[in-house]
C-alpha cells in the first residue's frame, strides 16, 4: 500500500492525499520518503496547475514520530532526518504551482509546518480542528522550518508568543491570529475554496523567497523595534522560566538569528538547535511523560476498561469555589446538576460563578449557553437531590460533617448511585464508615480551579469495587479530565507530595534563608509556582488546618519551626492572598519584609543550589514513602499527578523522572546526608534503598 494517493483532474489540479501506514500521518523517515516521492511525481506531471494537500486519516498530520525520536540519541542521524525534511518541504513550496493545505483534524508540530510550506492554508471549522506548534511543551522547538516560516506569516511578536506558549489553538482562533487563511464549514466547501484560490493565484511565491517582502505587524528584522522586542522577549522569558526551559530560549534565538539570514541558511540554524534539544536528557524525559505516559493514562492502561457510567443527574454538596466549579464542569458536559448548600449567600455566589464561566464559552450561541445554565439547580433543600446517580461531596474537611452528609443524603439517591468525596486528604475508607454501600464509595479529588486544572485523582477505599472505578473512569473522560488512580491513605499522593514542597519552603524561611532566594531557587528548578507564593494562594489557615488534620489521621507529629512560622503568621492575620497579606504583600506582589523577624538565625549554608537540593529532595523522599505505603499503583501516575495537578517542574518529566535522571543510588546518598543534618523527613524509603542496591530505575 502506498503512503500517498495522487490524482489529477482535467483542470490540472492535483490532490495529494497523505495516508501513511497506521492510524495517523506522523513525520519520520516513511513520511519524508512519501512526500519526496510525491513531489517528484508532481514535478513530472504535465499540465499541473496546482496541488491540494490533504489527509486520508482522521487528522491532517499529528506531528513528529516521537517513538522514533525518543529512542534516537545520535545527533548525526537526527540531523540527517531534519535536513531531508527541510529539503522535502522546500521542494513542495518551489514546485512552481500553487499548493494549498486542506486541514481537517489536527495539524500539529511538523504537521502544521507542512501546512506552512504550502502557499495557502484552509481548515475545517470544527471542534476537532487543532492547529499549532506545541514542541516547546516537549522540550523541543519546531524543527521543520516553523521558527523561520511563522514570523513571515503572522509577524515576529505573534510568532514568538505562539511558539513560546506551546499551545495548539482551535480553528476560529487560528484564523484570527493568521495561522490559517480561511475556514470552511464542510469538507466539500474546503476543497472548493482551495480550487478557487489556486485558480486566482497561478504563480504564488512564499514570502520568505521574495526579495522585498515586509513582515506582518510592522516590526521588521534589524529595526530598533525588532531589537527592543527581542531584548524584552528574552527578559520576559527569563522572568517567566528562570532559565529552566532551554527550548523556549532556543526558539527565540532561532527566530532572531534566522531573520537576518537567507532562508536556507536560517533553516540550518533551526536544524542545529533542534538536534541539540532532541538529543538532550530534558527533552527525552518530557517526551516520555507528556506524550507516552499521558497517553497511557488517557487510555487507562493497566486499569479496568471504562464502562457506561449511567450518570444523568449529578449532585454537588457544597457551593464553595470547588463546588461551583464542579457544577459548571458537569453541566458543560451535559449532566443535570444540583448544587446544595446551607447558605443562600453561598448559592448566589455559586450561581454567579457558573454564569461567569459559561459567558467565557464564546463559541456557544445564546440558546446553547442558556440550556447549559438551565441544567443547574441551586438549593438549600435535600429533597432536590432525590434520584441522583452521582454525588460529589465538597463540604469542609471535617470527618463529622462529611459523615453527617453521607447519612442524610445516601437514602435519597438512585438505586445504583455512586458516592464520591472530593476530600483532599481524609482517607476514603474512614469516610465510608457510615455508608450503606461502601462498594460504591470512592474519592474523586479535583484541583482548583476545577475549570482549568486537567487532573482528577481517583482514590480507592478498601471496599470500593472495580465496577465503581470503571464507571468513574468513564465519568472522568466525560468531563475531560486526566485521571490517575491511587490507593487509600491520608493525603493520598498529591496532597502529601504538595505538602512536602510547601513545608520545606517554609522550613527554609524559618531557618533564616532569604525568602526571595527560596522563591527564585524553586523557579530555577522548574517549579511552576514557588512555595511561598503558592502557599499564599491556597491560604495559610488551610495549611494550619491541614497540619492538624494530618496529626489526627496519622501517627506523625509535625514538630517543625516552619509550621510554627505559618501558625504565627495566621495569628497576625496574614492568611495569604485572600486577605492580600501572607508571605507576600499582595498589593505590591513582593515578599513581606517582616518575615526576617521570624527566622531562627543565619544558616551555615545557603544559595540557589542548596535550596533547590532541599526542595527537590524533600519531594523525592515523599515519593519514596508513597511507594513504600502502596499509595501509588503505577509510578507514571506520580509524574503525571505531580505535573498536571501540582505544578511540579515540567522540565524534569516529573519526580520519578527526576530521581531516575539523577540516579536512584545518588538520590539515596543525598537523602541520607540531608537527613543527618535536617531531620528524619529526608530519610530514604525502603523502596528507594532497594532500587539503589540493585541498580534499578523507574523507567528503562
Image (cartoon, rainbow, N blue to C red):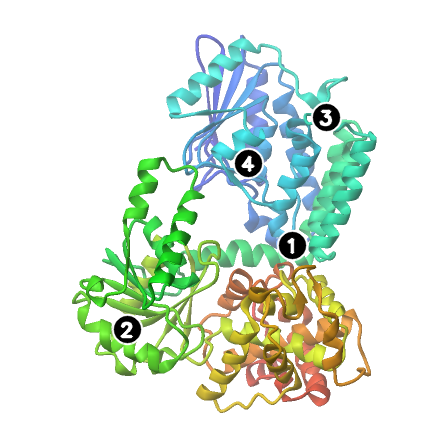
Q: Secondary structure at mark 2?
A: loop
Residue sitting nearer the eye, 249 or 413:
413
Which numbered circle lies on residue 465? 2
Residue on which the image places disc 3: 218
Q: Does residue 401 appear to the left or right of 656 in the view shown?
A: left
Residue sitting nearer the eye, 562 or 41:
562
Q: Secondary structure at mark 3?
A: loop
Q: CA distance from mark 4 to mark 1?
A: 19 Å
Which numbered disc, 3 or 1, marks the residue that appears first in the sequence? 3
Crowding around mark 1 (Cα neighbors within 10 Å: few <14, some 14 to 19, many 20+) is many
Q: CA distance from mark 4 to mark 2?
A: 43 Å
Report if the CB atoms under discs 4 and 2 are less than 8 Å apart: no
Q: CA distance from mark 2 to mark 1?
A: 39 Å
- Please identify, in this view, whether the residue under mark 2 or under mark 3 is nearer the observer: 3
Residue 679: image quadrant is: bottom right
Crowding around mark 3 (Cα neighbors within 10 Å: few <14, some 14 to 19, many 20+) is few
Which numbered disc, 4 or 1, marks the residue that appears first in the sequence? 4
* Image quadrant containing the C terminus: bottom right
- Please identify, in this view, whether the residue under mark 2 or under mark 1 is nearer the observer: 2
Whole-percent x and y of residue 449?
Answer: 48, 58
Crowding around mark 2 (Cα neighbors within 10 Å: few <14, some 14 to 19, many 20+) is some
Report if the CB atoms under discs 4 and 1 are less than 8 Å apart: no
Which numbered circle lies on residue 111? 4
Whole-percent x and y of residue 57?
Answer: 42, 35
* Image quadrant containing the N terminus: top left
Residue on which the image places disc 1: 283
Amino acid at each position: 500500500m502506498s503512503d500517498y494517493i495522487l490524482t489529477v483532474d482535467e483542470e490540472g489540479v492535483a490532490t495529494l492525499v497523505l495516508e501513511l501506514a497506521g492510524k495517523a500521518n506522523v513525520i519520520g523517515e516513511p513520511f519524508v520518503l512519501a512526500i519526496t516521492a510525491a513531489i517528484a511525481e508532481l514535478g513530472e506531471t504535465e499540465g499541473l496547475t496546482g496541488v491540494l494537500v490533504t489527509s486520508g486519516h482522521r487528522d491532517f498530520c499529528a506531528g513528529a514520530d516521537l517513538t522514533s525520536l525518543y529512542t534516537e540519541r545520535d545527533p548525526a542521524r537526527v540531523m540527517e532526518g531534519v535536513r531531508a525534511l527541510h529539503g522535502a518541504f522546500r521542494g513542495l513550496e518551489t514546485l512552481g504551482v500553487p499548493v494549498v493545505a486542506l486541514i481537517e483534524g489536527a495539524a500539529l508540530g511538523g504537521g502544521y509546518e507542512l501546512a506552512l510550506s504550502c502557499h495557502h492554508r484552509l481548515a475545517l471549522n470544527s471542534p476537532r480542528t487543532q492547529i499549532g506548534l506545541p514542541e516547546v511543551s516537549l522540550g523541543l522547538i519546531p524543527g521543520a522550518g516553523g521558527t523561520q516560516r511563522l514570523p513571515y506569516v503572522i509577524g515576529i511578536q505573534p510568532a514568538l508568543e505562539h511558539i513560546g506558549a506551546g499551545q495548539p489553538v482551535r480553528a476560529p482562533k487560528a484564523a484570527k491570529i493568521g495561522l490559517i487563511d480561511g475556514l470552511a464549514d464542510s469538507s466539500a466547501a474546503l476543497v472548493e475554496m482551495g480550487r478557487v484560490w489556486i485558480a486566482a493565484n497561478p504563480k504564488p511565491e512564499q514570502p520568505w523567497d521574495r526579495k522585498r517582502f515586509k513582515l506582518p505587524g510592522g516590526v521588521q528584522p534589524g529595526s530598533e523595534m525588532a531589537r527592543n522586542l527581542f531584548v524584552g522577549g528574552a527578559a520576559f522569558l527569563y522572568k517567566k522560566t528562570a532559565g529552566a526551559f532551554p527550548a523556549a530560549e532556543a526558539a527565540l534565538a532561532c527566530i532572531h538569528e534566522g531573520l537576518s539570514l537567507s532562508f536556507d541558511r536560517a533553516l540550518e540554524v533551526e536544524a542545529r538547535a533542534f538536534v541539540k534539544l532532541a538529543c538532550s536528557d530534558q527533552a527525552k524525559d518530557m517526551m516520555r511523560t507528556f506524550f507516552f505516559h499521558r497517553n497511557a493514562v488517557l487510555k487507562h492502561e493497566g486499569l479496568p476498561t471504562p464502562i457506561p457510567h449511567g450518570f444523568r443527574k449529578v449532585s454537588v454538596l457544597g457551593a464553595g469555589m470547588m463546588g461551583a466549579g464542579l457544577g459548571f464542569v458537569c453541566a458543560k458536559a451535559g449532566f443535570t446538576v444540583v448544587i446544595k448548600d446551607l447558605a443562600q449567600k453561598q448559592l448566589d455566589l455559586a450561581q454567579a460563578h457558573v454564569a461567569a464561566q459559561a459567558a467565557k464559552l464564546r463559541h456557544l450561541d445564546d440558546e446553547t449557553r442558556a440550556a447549559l445554565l438551565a441544567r443547574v439547580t441551586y438549593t438549600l433543600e435535600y429533597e432536590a437531590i432525590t434520584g441522583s446517580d452521582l454525588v460529589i461531596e465538597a463540604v469542609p474537611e471535617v470527618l463529622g460533617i462529611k459523615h453527617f452528609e453521607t447519612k442524610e443524603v445516601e437514602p435519597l439517591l438512585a438505586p445504583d448511585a455512586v458516592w464520591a468525596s472530593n476530600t483532599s486528604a481524609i482517607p476514603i475508607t474512614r469516610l465510608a464508615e457510615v455508608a450503606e454501600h461502601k462498594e460504591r464509595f470512592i474519592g474523586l479529588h479535583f484541583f482548583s480551579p476545577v475549570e482549568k486544572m486537567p487532573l482528577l485523582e481517583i482514590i480507592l477505599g478498601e471496599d470500593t469495587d472495580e465496577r465503581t472505578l470503571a464507571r468513574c473512569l468513564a465519568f472522568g473522560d466525560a468531563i475531560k479530565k486526566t485521571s490517575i488512580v491511587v490507593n487509600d491513605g491520608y493525603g493520598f499522593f498529591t496532597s502529601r507530595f504538595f505538602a512536602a514542597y510547601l513545608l520545606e519552603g517554609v522550613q527554609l524561611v524559618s531557618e533564616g534563608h532569604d525568602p526571595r532566594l527560596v522563591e527564585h531557587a524553586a523557579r530555577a528548578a522548574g517549579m511552576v509556582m514557588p512555595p511561598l507564593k503558592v502557599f499564599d494562594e491556597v491560604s495559610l489557615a488551610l495549611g494550619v488546618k491541614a497540619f492538624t488534620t494530618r496529626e489526627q489521621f496519622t501517627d506523625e507529629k509535625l514538630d517543625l519551626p516552619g509550621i510554627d512560622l505559618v501558625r504565627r503568621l495566621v495569628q497576625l492575620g496574614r492568611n495569604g492572598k485572600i486577605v492580600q497579606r501572607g508571605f507576600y504583600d499582595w498589593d505590591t506582589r513582593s515578599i513581606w519584609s517582616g518575615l526576617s523577624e521570624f527566622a531562627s538565625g543565619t544558616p551555615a549554608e545557603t544559595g540557589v543550589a542548596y535550596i533547590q537540593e532541599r526542595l527537590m529532595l524533600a519531594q523525592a523522599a515523599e515519593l519514596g514513602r508513597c511507594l513504600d505505603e502502596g499509595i501509588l499503583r503505577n509510578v507514571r501516575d506520580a509524574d503525571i499527578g505531580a505535573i498536571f495537578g501540582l505544578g511540579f517542574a515540567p522540565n524534569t518529566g516529573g519526580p520519578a523522572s527526576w530521581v531516575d535522571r539523577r540516579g536512584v543510588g545518588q538520590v539515596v546518598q543525598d537523602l541520607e546526608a540531608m537527613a543527618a543534618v535536617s531531620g528524619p523527613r529526608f530519610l530514604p524509603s525502603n523502596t528507594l534503598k532497594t532500587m539503589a542496591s540493585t541498580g534499578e530505575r523507574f523507567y528503562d
